[in-house]
Image (cartoon, rainbow, N blue to C red):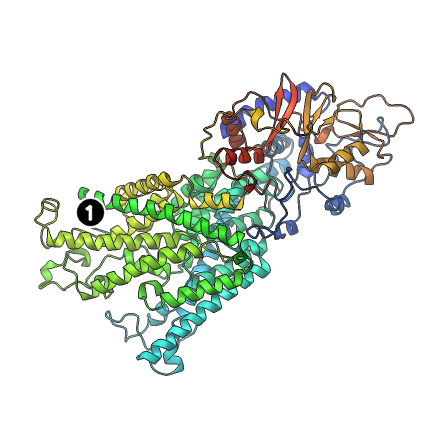
Amino acid sequence: MSNFWTSLRGKHAADRERGSEGMENPGYCSGSFDGLQHPSDDDDDEMVDIAGATLDFSTTDDVPPLSSGVYEESNGTSRTAGMNGNGPSRLVDPLEDPLPGVGTYEDFNTIDWVREKSKDRDRHREITNKSRQSTVALLHSISDAFSGWLLMLLVGLMSGALAGGIDISAHWMTDVKGGLCLRGFWFNHEHCCWLSNETTFQERDRCPQWQSWAELITGKSEGPFAYIMNYLMYIFWALMFSFLAVILVRAFAPYACGSGIPEIKTILSGFIIRGYLGKWTLIIKTITLVLAVSSGLSLGKEGPLVHVACCCANILCHLFTKYRKNEAKRREVLSAAAAVGVSVAFGAPIGGVLFSLEEVSYYFPLKTLWRSFFAALVAAFTLRSINPFGNSRLVLFYVEFHTPWHLVELAPFILLGIFGGLWGALFIKANIAWCRLRKTTCLGHYPVIEVLVVAALTALLAYPNSYTRMSGSELISELFNDCSLLDSSQLCGYKQPANTSDTGVDNSLADRPAGPGLYTALWQLALALVFKMMITVITFGMKVPSGLFIPSMAVGAIAGRLLGVGMEQLAYYNHDSVIFKGWCSQGADCITPGLYAMVGAAACLGGVTRMTVSLVVIMFELTGGLEYIVPLMAATMTSKWVADAFGREGIYEAHIRLNGYPFLEPKEEFEHSSLAVDVMRPRRMDPALAVLTQEGMTVGEVESLVESTHFSGFPVVVSSESQRLVGFVLRRDLLISIDNARKRQDGIVSASQVVFTEHTPLLPPDAPPPLRLRCIMDLSPFTVTDHTPMDITVDIFRKLGLRQCLVTHNGRLLGIITKKDILKHMAQMANRDPDSILFN
């Protein structure tokens, strides 16, 4: 995309040179944008329930009409002098008197990437020129260059601190469902038993300082009554936590629900959703994420942590003028924040940067790559300093394997990849079907009841099985674990070796026959697998913060552990067979079931999200084992191939399409032979295109045209007869300018002529003064001819981030193509409902 920006400079320079004698940059009025008044912080906290589809999108035009009341507050602060005085002789330079609000965007609109980049280049050029004139200006230039790194430092510190608090709180509240610590209620189970002298390896989870609810209430720790009491308290706390989570989201921040990654991807592509990254969303998402994870619902905190990090970045952007006033620059910061979110979620800074590059970001220049790396480093360092898990690691399930894998094991690894791809494709179809049912039926009208029912069902079915009762992170940690001499887990319930010579190095044990404890664990894991696969489908997408990484990894880890134990027993009883002979002798530690669990986790997560490179790096950073990159790559790639055979969309792209966000997927190929004339508006039977002429129209005529249409902008032509294109003016800028001129300038009335030319035309002596609006007009709008193939047009929209493109024939204006038109056309070509694109 950066190559396109480079080529643009010549185009804009030529356009400015052609039509700008006497003005520095009339194409975008460069000097005026530094003083623009963007929406206040309060605008970022307006909350609209997107998922509930409460907005009216019945209109088929680009944007809903603007009311003049939008500008009352900003216009009140503007100066009396505007774009012109009482007559042509009293012209005021618009570069010195910028209009508040011009160049900003309405909610649920797409930004103009070209204009934003042009604004930033002009701003940087002005700072550079001034820096040569004085020491103060030079210091300002240095601080401007350093501001991006300072912002990254603050984002990393704030996100790391919040992630550490979330981890500690979620761990404690998860343990509260089982009991309390007598030494202090603020200790979780593990910390409570650290200083106990009565703890043994066989019963390391039991200590006198930690008592279950049955012991606290009835004084008994064993027996059916104690079990029922603990069961009821588990359900009570699960319902309490989930109820608080959904009530807080519903009452204070509707945008705090869900994963947040589909919306983050849409925002990074240029779409504006006011309030989605506001301070209320950050506060409520942080609190309710802890509650939702602690309730035992089948969800994770990794996806929401990306949303939390992006909220931190958006709020901190308001401290720096460069990022507060430029939407494109702000999106560079948000791309780095997405990397920070994954860095603190998995303790994987490099994987976080690659995740932002591969999965989330729309525009990712090299400078953003460096800053993302720095921010992820700071966030990981902050989280490591907090040490939320007490193991000097960044994640709860850090493991290290020492047994090398053999080439024969590639077959089961690929088998896990096939399972992950099939599960991913099945999950996406099932979850989207359930979410569509939620949106189209009365189920969506009762989000609180839905969350409580799912929470009650989850707690009721999860408690009897120890592997579903524990949290998702603890389950994955248990499944990744490699059995040693000191392990008392049921998964390590093998028959003990006859002598100590069967033990391997590093406390690892040689392959052994499965004992009764292991068989019991395998049955419980099989039931947990079915339960997790089914309950995750209906949990993801509810009105609580819900991530998908941990549930997907848990499904894959269970399947991998089951297969790993099966391979281990196969190798133990058939070590003389052709497959195992030569590399797996009797008494050797040949198979590592924990490695299979790790590969299965990667395969299932890859099947659901379609991540590849970033996923392998994340899993590598989790385990620290370089020698297992090839199994991870094989399983992840197989998973993606299998899942793509059933549909090329990952779960986030599927939710973007379900919600109708205007997201032009960069990975999707346009394979049709359409031309620009087939997609543009107006169509053959439609009314003529609404245009403005560069002179001859009055203020009243322009206002009538704006009020009678709902388009986001209007082409400016030489005359109605010639239809020769001059430029393009946005509806919002036009309304702000006219409203400001009527209130603040003398003589501007409905009969005043609106002029887009550089020189004011001759007017009768008794005529009111004209209103010059050349400053708000884009003199270099992007155009294509009517016979331009649509695949080229789509590439232009993707790589330049265009809002609209004008269609011409021999220089005459024919029509306009917007991003929404392209999305509708692509939906129509794919036999989908084109009206599913709700937002403009």
Give percent across and percent down for residue 174.
41, 66
Q: How many marks?
A: 1
- Rendered residue at 68%/39% (across/down): 36
Q: Amino acid at mark 1?
A: Pro
Q: Camera-side residue: 39 or 494?
A: 494
Identify whether 144 is placed above or below 485. Answer: above
Residue, disc 1: 404
As drawn, the residue found furthest toward the bottom would be: 219
The residue furthest front is 685
Residue found at the far left of this picture: 576
Residue found 22% across the figure and 43% down from its top: 410
In the displayed image of the protein, which residue is found farthest to the top?
810
Q: Is residue 537 above or below residue 148?
A: below
Residue 548 location in percent, x, y? Answer: 42, 52
Is residue 772 toward the left or the right of residue 4 in the image? right
The C terminus is located in which quarter? top right
Residue at 25%, 45% in the rendered image: 415
Where is residue 103, by image quadrant?
Answer: top right
Using the image, determine if residue 603 lies above or below residue 17: below
> Residue 651: x and y, percent?
43, 46
**Neighbour tally class for label 1: few under 14, some 14-19, many 20 plus, Cα within 10 Å:** few
Viewer-nearest residue: 247 or 372: 247
Pick the residue in front: 479 or 58: 58
x and y percentages locating residue 377 in the rendered image: 42, 47
| Whether residue 88 can be seen here | yes
Asked if residue 393 lies left or right of residue 56, the reply is left
SS for callout 1: loop
Name the residue nearer the viewer: 331 or 225. 225
